[in-house]
């Protein structure tokens, strides 16, 4: 059977934008594995029942591999790929795996939030009407305010600038987060930039930001694989 | 020849407190290697001339290994130890090494600063008179304000609480930063806590902070090796 990746999409189904799905897309390309993208919408919780997740909180990405095995959770999928297709290391040894976990936590708890503040209304606008309602309800409950109150581009940019300091320092002496070649650490960080790129025409980085060169390298991988999904700025 | 580690000390030479020296102390214990601590003061730049560093900015830690090889810079020393004594992995494979670099950058650019704001006057008070002058001049130039203006315990604590979020999340499902057992990632983070512990009686963590259990585990390693250096609170 073909390998399938269930991915969040906007009203336009070419718009795959979830940062967690992007981790997996990039990891699949890293391993040289083809896949079929299955568009999924926030409201379609029951369509993920086969994955075995608690339905009320069911999420993508979900991978259905060629042997029929089903894996959910982006980091679990990366680990599945590393075990099943050991060529071209993506995660590395046990210490590399633990430190990848740290990078994931840093991305989820420090990097995501300022970007979310900058693009929350762009995400809302990218969704179709039924998903807009589900998105607004769940996010406003979590944030304790309206999406419009939460969106604050200037505050997000200022906070992002501070949060990116470790990454800027790292990329001053190495071309990739994971050293001389990209691997899972790069894909986890890139997911956040891909998320913003697909839904928002507002750039996250100044043109002369040292991170811009890394971002261009990431967009150029595998003959520009990531650029096959159009950027919001290109619409 | 005996293995020697040049380490920054306070007026009381038992008070070794540099976070960078602590990375190396812990790494040496990790590898089961004995060493002789050579106390060093900020003002003694020329005593590090043998290490080959630019003198104006000469720093500890400097390691002189049993074969006479001399290494400076904490991460370079960790890599030297891993190459020279490959048993009991400390760094791991190439991907693990790159991600350790990320953790170091995160520690240097996000974790250090709020702690420094909380303990800068404690550091000053731990030094002898000649070092106090050197410390005040260099730090006030760098900070653009007096040490007294920079010290802000409440602001430091609030900022620290935010910065620690990824670490708290990580340590909720693993006993150590580096997974099931401690390694270089733990020692790099622990350095900051050891720094504060030795010079300042003010705790960085609330008693019920989930990080407290990790800190106790770190202090207990190798039969309480780190506790051999007295805490400021114990004076």
Image (spheres, coloured by chain):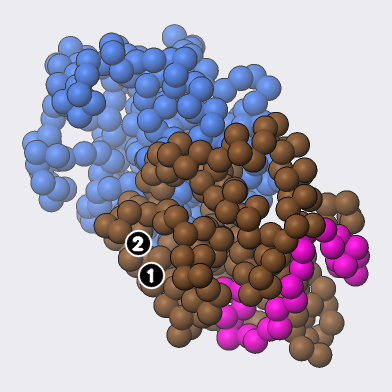
Chain colours: A blue, B brown
Q: Which one is in front, A122 or B221?
A: B221
The residue nearer to you, when weighing B207 against A98, is B207
As helix, strand or loop, the secondary structure at mark 1 comes to helix
Which chain is home to disc 2?
A: B
Relative to A179, is A6 on the left or the right? left
Which picture quadrant has residue B157? Answer: top left
Q: Is residue B41 magenta?
A: yes
Whether residue B54 sits left or right of residue A72 in the image: it is right
* Crowding near the residue tagged with mark 2, few <14, some 14–19, many ≥20 C-alpha atoms within 10 Å: some
The magenta segment: B25-52
| Chain letter of disc 1 in the image | B
The residue to which callout 1 is attached is B216
Query: Can you identify the residue that label 2 sits on?
Result: B212
Q: Is residue B146 left or right of residue A43?
A: right
Q: Which mark is residue B46?
A: none
The answer as to whether the residues below labels 2 and 1 share one chain is yes
Q: Are marks 2 and 1 in contact (CB under 8 Å)?
A: yes
Q: CA distance from mark 2 to mark 1?
A: 6 Å
Counting from the top left corner in percent of width and height, residue A62 is at 25, 44
| Location of residue A155 by image quarter | top left
Categorize mark 1 by other alpha carbons within 10 Å: few (<14), some (14-19), many (20+).
few
Image coordinates of residue A178 in percent, x first then y, are 57, 51
Relative placement, left or right, of A119 versus A59 is right
Q: Is the N terminus of chain B in the top left, top right, bottom left or bottom right quadrant?
A: bottom right
Tell me the element at label 2: helix
Residue A185 in percent (x, y) is at: 50, 48
- Which residue is located at x 76 percent, y 88 percent? B2
Which residue occupies 16% across, 40% down? A58
Residue A170 in the image: above or below residue A96: above
Q: Quadrant of residue A235?
A: top left
Which residue is nearer to you in this view: B55 or A75? B55
Q: Residue at x 73, y 45 (%)?
A: B136
């Amino acid at each position: 059977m073909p390998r399938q990746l269930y991915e969040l999409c906007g009203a336009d189904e070419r718009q795959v934008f979830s940062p967690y799905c992007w981790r997996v897309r990039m990891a699949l390309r890293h391993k040289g594995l083809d896949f079929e993208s299955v568009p999924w919408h926030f409201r379609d919780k029951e369509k993920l029942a086969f994955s075995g997740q608690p339905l009320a909180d069911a999420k993508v990405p979900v991978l259905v591999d060629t042997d029929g095995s089903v894996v959910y959770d982006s980091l679990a999928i990366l680990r599945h790929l590393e075990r099943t297709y050991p060529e071209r290391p993506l995660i590395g040894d046990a210490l590399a795996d633990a430190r990848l976990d740290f990078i994931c936590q840093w991305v989820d708890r420090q990097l995501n939030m300022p970007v979310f503040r900058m693009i929350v209304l762009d995400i809302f606008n990218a969704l179709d009407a039924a998903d807009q309602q589900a998105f607004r309800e769940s996010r406003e409950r979590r944030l304790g305010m309206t999406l419009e109150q939460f969106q604050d581009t200037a505050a997000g940019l200022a906070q992002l600038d501070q949060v990116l300091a470790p990454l800027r320092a790292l990329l001053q002496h190495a071309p990739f987060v994971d050293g001389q070649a990209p691997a899972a650490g790069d894909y986890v960080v890139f997911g956040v930039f891909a998320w913003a790129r697909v839904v928002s025409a507002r750039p996250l980085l100044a043109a002369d930001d040292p991170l811009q060169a890394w971002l261009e390298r990431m967009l150029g991988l595998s003959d520009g694989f990531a650029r096959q999904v159009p950027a919001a700025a290109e619409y």
